[in-house]
Image: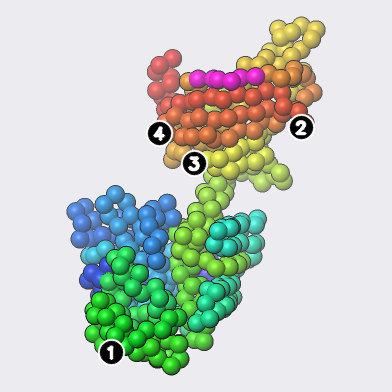
Amino acid sequence: MLELQRTIVNPVSMSGIGLHTGTSCTMTFKPAPINHGIRFVRTDLGGNPEIPAICDYVVDISRGTTLGIGEAKVYTVEHVLAAVVGLQIDNLIIELDGIEPPIGDGSALPYVEKLIEAEFEQQDAPKDYLIIDETVMYHNEDNQIDIVALPLDTYRITVMVDYQNPALGSQHTGMFDLEKEFVSEFAPARTFCFLSEVEELANSGLIKGGDLDNAVVIVDKKYSENELENLTEKLQIGQKVTLGENGILNNKELRFRNEPVRHKLLDMIGDLALIGVPIKAQILAARPGHKANVEFAKLVRKLYQQKKLVRKYQHIKKEGVIFDVNAIQRILPHRYPFLLVDKIIHLELDKKVIGVKSVSVNEPFFQGHFPGQPIMPGVMIIESMAQTGGILLLNAFPNPEEKLVVFMQISNAKFRKPVVPGDQLYLEVEMVSRKSKVVLMNAKAFVNETLVAEAEFMAGIVDREVAKTDS
């Protein structure tokens, strides 16, 4: 896999109609600078709004993946993004004068050919790979969908589909070398649907630009000549339609024996581009679809964001430690004698954090609380939990080190057992909700496995300069 970032040299354009909207669009690929990423630009809208190709901006997954910010949307981005990832392009501007990219022949090949025509340029910056070093799993029980990412020092995808339909049955495929296999083995795989779905899709306002030249229609239902004529008229297909003898409408030849599952893999490559960075992992997927792909991409992107933040603050990697005390001091403003968390051992951004506070007899509060019988004050335990909870807000603002977390309310505080010198507090804090600059958290403190304190608290996030002024 390439190690330096890549863009294109020359702008290139292509025009056509969108698969689902049926609207005309000219799409232009343009070079982009280092660390720009992939961004769609709607040139037909005022201000030329940009939409980064990131899963945070997915607004719809009805038979395709749609990105949007406010009124600006781009439908069916997965084939375009698959071409971009397949050619290992990191930085690209994709301008559109319409709402949906041209569908071409229903595969990613037309986009691949245009991008190859544009020529590639290596850029003077390393790729920002997300290296999967732990198993990431997604499971949907209702639809029996499983997607797993496993550690691997390259990018591989294996996909299995089972449509429980005799017209297609079970299929599987795998891509083991992006550079060698993508263009020839997967980019040409076209979108497909079952004949029984066509009328339903049309009634839902989809496939307005679909025809027999940009989709493979698998015959899974018998139609009379009259029914076929009515369907042809409804879909405004300008050619005669026959059921075919090979199981494909109009006897269209498949490009690969297992072209449908290859297209599913192609869709997945495009949807996983929404992680926002290239990845090194083994991806195993059973019965994937756009919704599951995007949900999985969100899981992996959160992992990427967490790793990026950890690298920012934790300069020395330590086994079993997310943030040591030096990293914590880069994040939190607290200092001796009021820094009450020593390390962070578990972190799920915006969800849960576990911190550790080793309680020493040298704590300054033991001098007066109480002489001869030292007990850690309950308010100090609350403060330890609150400081630990502040780590959860790392992903909430661009520069968390410029913010302060201040108490607004403490409720349901309970102190169940004294904490004394020699104890080690495990501080578990979970995010309940976050609205604008106000957060609700639920916290518990344990010594070994014994619950010693718990509380719910509301906190506000303010700028450090504001806090100084108010004080």
343 sits left or right of 84 in the view: right
Whether residue 34 is visible here, answered yes or no, is no
Q: Gap between marks 2 and 4, in whole Å?
A: 35 Å
Whether residue 443 is visible here, answered yes or no, is yes
Q: Quadrant of residue 453?
A: top right
Sooner in the amino-acid sequence: mark 3 or mark 1: 1
The residue that disc 4 covers is 436
The residue that disc 2 covers is 449
Nearer the observer, 37 or 165? 165
Residue at 53 percent of width and 57 percent of height: 296
Task: Estimate how packed mark 2 is, as few (under 14), some (14 to 19) or many (20 or more) residues with alpha carbons within 10 Å.
Answer: few
Task: Estimate how packed mark 3 is, as few (under 14), some (14 to 19) or many (20 or more) residues with alpha carbons within 10 Å.
Answer: some
Sooner in the amino-acid sequence: mark 2 or mark 4: 4
The residue that disc 1 covers is 240
- Nearest to the eye among marks 3 and 1: give it: 1
Task: Estimate how packed mark 4 is, as few (under 14), some (14 to 19) or many (20 or more) residues with alpha carbons within 10 Å.
Answer: few
332 inside magenta stretch: no
Report if the CB atoms under discs 3 and 4 are less than 8 Å apart. Answer: no
Task: Estimate how packed mark 1 is, as few (under 14), some (14 to 19) or many (20 or more) residues with alpha carbons within 10 Å.
Answer: few
Amino acid at the residue labelled 3:
Asn
Identify the mark at residue 175; answer none if there is no mark: none
Residue at 22 percent of width and 71 percent of height: 24
Amino acid at the residue labelled 4:
Ser
Secondary element type, mark 2: loop
Is the magenta region chiefly helix, strand or loop?
strand
Amino acid at the residue labelled 2:
Glu
Sooner in the amino-acid sequence: mark 4 or mark 1: 1
Start-end of magenta stretch = 409-414
Secondary element type, mark 3: helix
- Residue 73, image x and y in percent? 30, 57
The residue that disc 3 covers is 395
Amino acid at the residue labelled 1:
Lys
